[in-house]
Image: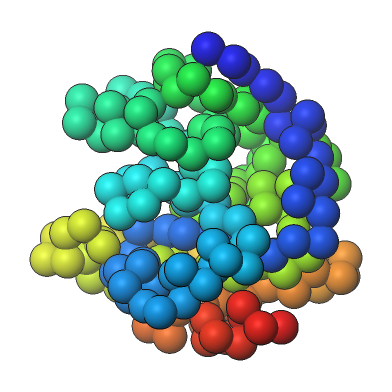
Amino acid sequence: MLVKKLIELKNIYKGRKAIVCGCGQSLNDFYNSEYFKKVNESNIITIGVNDVPKLFDPTHLVITDHVTRFNKSRIDLINNCKSKSVITCVKGWNHPKLVHFELGKRGRLELDDYERVDHHLNSPYTAVNIAYKLGASKIGMIGVDFTDGHFYSPKDGPHNLTRKYLSSINSSYEKLHRQLGNRGVDFYNLSLTSKVTAVPYLDLKNFIEI
């Protein structure tokens, strides 16, 4: 098993576009759209979180939760995914290509610290931070909806973070959007149904073409 440190991946995709993929229902819309194939053809990287390999293997997969929080089928899914690496801050994962980072502080934005990654309640937030550290100059996110259901289980009810934390999540993404903009990085929400309204919406077609 090869284990690298995140700093070894610093700016490996400098100037490229990245799409961060959460597990909301809009990920199905992305996968089933005419633009999914165009993303690969356009050399856009994808950074998924958690169960995204149930739908497709992203370029990289980010896991921030300990392995004990997953059942065996989900553990096997992650350890056997065909992504170039599984990027994680916890021990216990057995993907053949692991990349480790130190978890930073909640709500902080030390974007230019390439050994630590800050967090705020949800994995896609950390994945956007990682996309920046990998060098992406334009970052989109999809499946970060906080609406009812997931792409793999549309009837599993309201997202557990929406009742108490949606305002805080929006605030954290607003700050992240601003800090990325200060560094010349464009950041868009590619989901029209997402409740993360602090990040401006851009449709997939235009994201691919800009």
Is any atom of residue 8 visible in this view?
Answer: yes
Query: In the figure, is residue 76 to the left or right of 193?
Result: left
Please report the residue visible at 78 percent of the width from the left and 29 percent of the height from the top.
8
Residue at 30%, 54% in the rendered image:
55
Chosen colour scheme? rainbow
Vertical placement of residue 100 versus 136, above or below? above
Give the quarter of the image for residue 103: top right
What is the quadrant of residue 171 in the picture?
A: bottom right
Which residue, as the protein is rendered here, is positioned at the far top? 1
Q: Would residue 47 appear left or right of 187 to someone viewing this image?
A: left
Q: Is residue 168 left or right of residue 26?
A: right
Q: Nearer the viewer, residue 8 or 127?
A: 8
Could you tell whether 108 is left or right of 100 in the image? right
Please provide percent x and percent y for residue 1: 53, 12
**Residue 102 visible in the shown view:** no
Q: Residue furthest front?
A: 41
